Amino acid sequence: MEFKGYSVIKVTLIQLWRKEGYTRSPCLCGRTAGESAEGAVNCRVAGSRTTTTDDGTCYLNRDVNRRRRFSRFIVFVGSEGEGMDVSMALWGQDGVLLANSADRLKHPCEEQDRSSSPSVLRSVTNTWKDGLLNRKRPFVGRCCHSCTPQSQERLFNSSIPSLGLRNVIYINETHTRHRGWLARRLSYILFVLERDVRKDMFARNVVDNVLNSSKVQSAIEEVVSEARAEDQEAGTHQKAVSKVTRKARSLLQEMVANISPSLIRMTGWTLLKLFNGFFWSIQIHKGQLEMVKKAATEHNAPLVFLPVHKSHIDYLLITFILFCHNIKAPHIAAGNNLNIPIFSTLIRKLGGFFIRRKLDEAPDGKKDVLYRSLLHSYTEELLRQQQFLEVYLEGTRSRSGKPSPARAGMLSIVVDAMCAGSIPDVLIVPVGISYDRIIEGNYNSEQLGKPKKNESLWGVACGVFRMLRKNYGCVRVDFTQPFSLKEYLDTQRSRHLPATLTLEQILIPTIIAARPDQALFNGEEEEHPDSREMSEEPWRRQVISNLAKHVLFTASKSSAIMSTHIVACLLLYKHRQGVLLSKLVEDFFNMKEEILSRDFDLGFSGNSEDVVMHALNLLGNCVNVTSTNRNTEFIITPKNTVPALFELNFYSNGLFHVFIADAIIACSTLALLREQTAETCEGELGSSSNLLSQERLILRAAGLSHFLSNEVLVAIPCQTVYQVFQDAVTRLIQYGVLIVAEEDQEELSPSEEPWPKKFPEPLSWRSDEEDEDSDFGEEQRDRYLKVSSSPEHQEFFTFLQRVLSPVMEAYSGAAIFVHSLLSPMAEREYTQKLFKYLLTRTEKGVAAYGESATHYLVKNTVKTFKELGVLKERYEDGVCRLELSATFQPQANRNKLLQYILGFSLL
């Protein structure tokens, strides 16, 4: 972070708020107004004396003689050579808290009138802000009431949400059975020794049991049969079996974990030391862990943890938290890229087992039947012995800050094991993880197109050393409510699962006149039975895919929103040209209230000023802080360099899913208004072009959501997109951003139905359970909307459109680049050229949003255009080549694709 025109000095202590010799700041326990005040006198989470204010907020009272990590301050004093009053202060181990003078900046809720400085969310929050200030944090993570209603009630009770948060890396003598001076000094060691970790808790005789399983024996026979060819000599078969068996044992020993309880204890002590060095806190909700612990002890079923994947530290984080709560360490499915000397031994003894990144292919390009059977049997054996699993569905760390599409290979093995009768049931636990700042810092090198560096022992050592020199803020881990896999599958069998349509089938009729499958779009689909058996492969694949999407959606929705996410989002999409510090604090406060109102939790608490400065410090390399000549106010501006924009975009994507439905509605409104304006110029609609049919708006939004299916999941599979967008429209109407034009409905309603009576299933809005006699559909068809002309509402609507603008700009750039594809080109080469084209547009200032050129977005545009039928794959000599499909050979159709995308873009 750059501060221009100011010299920096260090002082011992500044008390912005003074009471009986103590400084006050937000407590690490995260307790805010309205939450329980347990431990208000001596907060066990914070480890020091606290004060609880009238509204229930917990604050630290740090003794001036007890500095710990919070005793160093950096003060910015006037311009160089001048003695001006202190205008800004940073505190913390690395100067984490930055705050203006206490007499000048006030918390927004303490001020009676802010009307002179309208906020992007002020018009939204005015009507219900007072109620939210005293509300509790939402309890996130309940399992789906539609797919698993029995699981939702089984482990939950009304007292669980009130258990509150806990910082798992704060340990003192109160967390052990001992008291006294020596216990305080040895609290980490005593805590680790008292954890319940025993050798008999983990799997035994795994290698022999797997090799003797019928599935592996069949695979060995199959491999031997293929290898024997014409060799029919007497002893050949036995020798071949022995050789393949030795190979199977070797593969298995490279794969399996070998958990060591003593190493888990030692690692637990080490992680307590390390995590306290570079994290402020690691917060968990005690109620969520209570449900997981109850499921682990009271239910005779193994648990499968399915976390989102943000950082390499995720592996250690989950195991460490479970270890601290006396929950058995899970076996972790890790990529074989981590199978490096020394480090791989440590991973195995902590529960990791290594799998290939691509399960189906052997080095010769054929399916490796032996390896796949070993992995299936090993997973079944772990589940049969009641071992817990930890699987990362995304397959790799997210480079965009958003969840990547699920890869359900390991999940399908778990489903098959249960359906084969190896185990009676499995409990699925989605896990959300949020970081103020990931330990990798950013993925800019990969987003700039550089190849990923291979993991090495030296790289691990350098990474640990680098982490110890920095502070990465807070971490929040949310364990959602475990649900029964058996119950989920039983529910799916009783439902009608329509045939899945491709993106080409859904959107081509909208983009151009061609219709690849007229019958499907007329709703003339085949009738499907109401129940399915798992032996039916298409149904099985769809159910597993839906389950993976369901889990990732739940884990993402349960992930807490961190302060860096909000600040990065505001700087990119609200204040890209810079903003006064006081205005940024005000908008931050309004934004966090808006997030809470949507039932998303926050990973921070405390005064907005303090939290904003904490976030700015963590984002220091991406922002500039300059002073003004007026009242020593400060201006915060995002840096306009490509790496800075990429990094800010990564953190702002942490709340992409919070506003995605509203953002799609805002962009669809923009597209319809442009379309109707063009029709008005032709004299078709007269003066009513500013009114929008709600049904038409939601249909357009549904199309855009499918177009962006590789970017974000808008709805879980058991929910229709219409329900999601109906809720979004209703919310915008309540905010006053959209207005129902009731006076003009009757005269503007078309005399004939302009839309088909039945849309393709992915675009339909009726749920299976909806009563056919309901007037729900008719009620919506007569509704016309218009956008409020209020400046505040227009500002909020523009903010929503800007949230999607980088994505739409990337796709529009890709649609322009398609014109240059004159002959077949290798996919790798095409992707690289497209990336260079978009990056050049950014560097020359042609692109309005520099973050639209990330390599992740580029790969998604190529994938989407293949699914849409714009690009066609052709394999030559094992190389995938791309060429234009017959549908998009005509330039007119390529222009229609570009115009379709530009219609949603904010120019």
Image: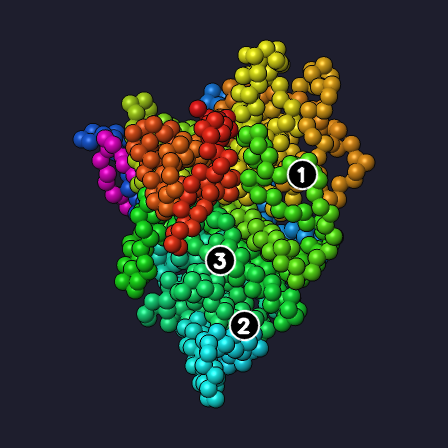
Residue at 35 percent across and 57 percent down: it is 277
Q: Nearer the viewer, residue 306 or 446?
A: 446
Q: Nearer the viewer, mark 2 or mark 1?
A: 1
Magenta highlight range: 1-20
User: Answer yes or no: do the residues labelled 3 and 2 have beta carbons within 8 Å?
Assistant: no
Q: Give the amino acid at mark 3.
A: Tyr
**Does 774 sit above or below residue 148?**
above
- The residue pinned by badge 3 equals 392
Q: Residues within 10 Å of mark 2 (few under 14, many from 20)?
A: many
**Does 355 sit above or below residue 200?**
above
- Rendered image: mark on residue 519: 1
Residue at 45 percent across and 64 percent down: it is 366
Q: Give the amino acid at mark 1.
A: Ala
Q: How many marks?
A: 3
User: Answer yes or no: do the residues labelled 2 and 1 have beta carbons within 8 Å?
Assistant: no
- Rendered image: mark on residue 377: 2
Q: Nearer the viewer, residue 60 or 585?
A: 585
Q: Residues within 10 Å of mark 3 (few under 14, many from 20)?
A: many
Q: Give the amino acid at mark 2.
A: Ser
Identify the mark nearer the N-term, 3 or 1: 3
- Residue 156 shows up from this direction: no
Image quarter (top left, top right, bottom left or bottom right) of the C terminus: top left
Indicate the secondary structure of the residue bearing disc 1.
helix
Q: Residues within 10 Å of mark 1 (few under 14, many from 20)?
A: few
Asked if the stretch drawn in magenta spans residue 475, the answer is no
- Inter-mark Cα distance, 2 to 1: 43 Å
Q: Looking at this rendering, what residue extends furthest in the bottom direction?
A: 234
Residue at 59 percent across and 10 percent down: it is 683
Q: Is 626 on the left or on the right of 22, as rendered?
A: left
- Residue 451 shows up from this direction: yes
Q: Looking at this rendering, what residue extends furthest in the front direction?
A: 230
- Inter-mark Cα distance, 3 to 1: 39 Å
